[in-house]
Amino acid sequence: MTEFGPVAWPPAPIGTERPVLRESEARDRAAFIELFASAEVCTYLGGPRPRDELERAVPEIPGRRPGLFVVALDGAMIGTITLLDRRNAERPGHVRPEAGEAELGYMFLPEAWGCGYAAEACAAALDWFADALPGEPVVLCTQTANDRSMRLAAKLGFTEVERFEEWGAEQWFGVWSSVPPFS
């Protein structure tokens, strides 16, 4: 991961109306394992990983890295958001000639789906990012077959840049910016 300059990590917990975005803690380990072992969650992410493999591989405090927020509801992890990862220049989909844009990623446990938590938490993460790195665009890539992710991208204000084939599926690639376009 390429660092994003002077962004201090971790930030103070970010509260929304319902969920809180915070740094990972040891109590989140079981939820991390559940996320990556879930066939539902990983349908569009290459499939689930075996639970026994995850039990061996996941550290005591998982996800402890810059740009990874745990999304918690009443203290319990319901998902994750990543935001400081730079998009790899070798992958298709970019909005700058030099590539390396910040890419939004998210995973939520199925019991949190359909409640608006992802939209609320991702909007808060994007607001934090806009304050931390004003004018820096954020990109998002999802399979067009992933209806939930496509709806979330639209709700968050991502606009389509292009579609392309990657990993054997059609991908939707969009951009979000805190800077309004010129009128």
Image: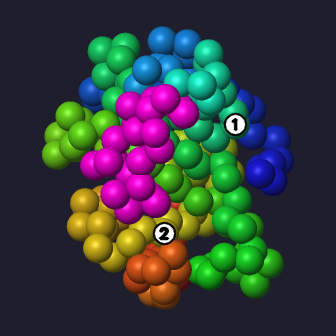
Q: Quadrant of residue 163?
A: bottom left
Q: Residue at x 70, y 59 (%)?
A: 86
Picture layout, residue 112 above or below residue 98: above
The stretch of residues the image draws in magenta is 32-54
Residue 68 visible (yes or no): yes
* 24 up-or-down from 163: above or below: above
Looking at the rendered structure, the kind of residue marked 2 is Cys
User: Given the image, on which type of amino acid does mark 1 rest?
Assistant: Pro
Q: Earlier in the sequence, mark 2 or mark 1?
A: 1
The answer to whether 169 appears left or right of 11 in the picture is left
- Residue 42 colored magenta? yes
- Residue placed most toward the observer, 35 or 125: 35
From what the image shows, is residue 49 above or below residue 25?
below
> Marks 2 and 1, Cα distance to the nearest angstrom?
20 Å
Q: Residue at x 41, y 80 (%)?
A: 169
Tell me the number on the disc at residue 141. 2
Question: Viewed as shown, does residue 24 lie left or right of 71?
Answer: right
Answer with the quarter of the image where residue 158 lies: bottom left
Q: Nearer the viewer, residue 10 or 25?
A: 25
Residue annotated with mark 1: 66
